[in-house]
Amino acid sequence: MKTLRVLCFIGLPTLVGLWFSRLWLRGRPSRLKIPSSPVVRHKQLVTDKRVFVIGDIHGCIDEFKLLLKKADVDLRTTVVVLAGDVVNKGPDSIAALRYARQIGALAVRGNNEEAVLRRVRTYYSGNKELLPIERYRWITGLTDDDVRWLARLPFTISIPSMHAIVVHAGLIPNLPLEEQSAETMVSARNVVTDSDGTMRSTTSVSEGSPIGFVWPGPELVCFGHDAKRRLQRHDFSIGLDTGCVYGDRLTGIYLDDLTKVYQVKAGKVYDKPAQ
């Protein structure tokens, strides 16, 4: 009788909902193997087409499409390159990912792709204690093809014809690409110079100098990640994360015409930045 009274108090629909919620959070075993690092860490894009680079999309699919339209991107003559963080935080990560795949866009790996892949590995393992964070529940809708696309994202895309490199967070000056750490390329915001002259990256914005500011060239580095500083223009680098998911703008630029920046306003505030 006591159990029956509890059931009546809580309500059968609520209990059913809780049961399905727990079931939904269980893993989905898969034979798909997801490497901890991309097979191709540094991709080279050899093309005679125009190249249009876009900052952090974060699942803002409407703004993604509007930006391509505003910039009059012709996919027959233009390669679209995304500077990482295509997914997470925003309204429809799966739609943004699949649209990027549909139009043949290239992308580099951001810290959010890294975080998603870590959780997908857990999900595919069949682990029952899965997705404690609400914002990652969307990964249950990913197909194996979606996951393969994410897992293949390189850390950098070099474009020799434009003397440019696209990376999510940035690069340590005077260090070959092969020696750049994954942490620097997906998470860094500043560079600190130690007393012995050695440079190291940090995720802090209060220590050292902005990573784009210290980049000496000669290649142009296009990066995202640093939404707090919004659009950044330095001698040999451009920061394109202008906080679309936080209600600001989505930004893109043609590498053969750096004088003009294309932007669309976010439809709304989708997420709040970390303090």
Image (cartoon, rainbow, N blue to C red):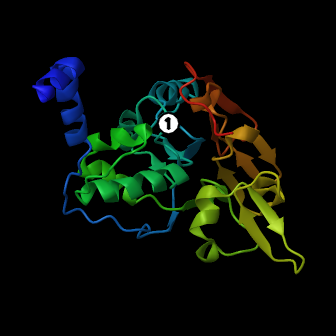
Question: Image check: 157 left or right of 149?
Answer: right
In which image quadrant can residue 173 be found? bottom right
In which image quadrant can residue 92 be found? top left
Question: Image check: 92 left or right of 9?
Answer: right
For the N terminus, which image quadrant? Answer: top left
Residue at the spot x=27%, y=40% of the render?
141
Q: Is 203 or 43 nearer to us in this picture?
A: 203
In the picture of the structure, the residue carrying the numbered disc 1 is 89
Q: In the orientation shown, which residue stands out farthest toward the front?
A: 1
x and y percent of residue 94 in the render? 36, 37
Q: Is 207 or 100 nearer to us in this picture?
A: 207
x and y percent of residue 193 in the render? 85, 70
Q: Secondary structure at mark 1?
A: loop
One can see residue 48 in this view? no
x and y percent of residue 81 in the render? 52, 47
x and y percent of residue 170 in the render? 67, 58
Q: Residues within 10 Å of mark 1 (few under 14, many from 20)?
A: many
Q: In the orientation shown, which residue stands out farthest toward the bottom?
A: 196
For the C terminus, which image quadrant? Answer: top right
Question: Image check: 220 left or right of 92?
Answer: right
Q: Is residue 137 above or below residue 209?
A: above
One can see residue 240 in this view? yes
Residue at the spot x=46%, y=42% of the render?
87
Amino acid residing under circle 1:
Lys
Residue at the spot x=77%, y=42% of the render?
232
In which image quadrant can residue 228 be found? top right
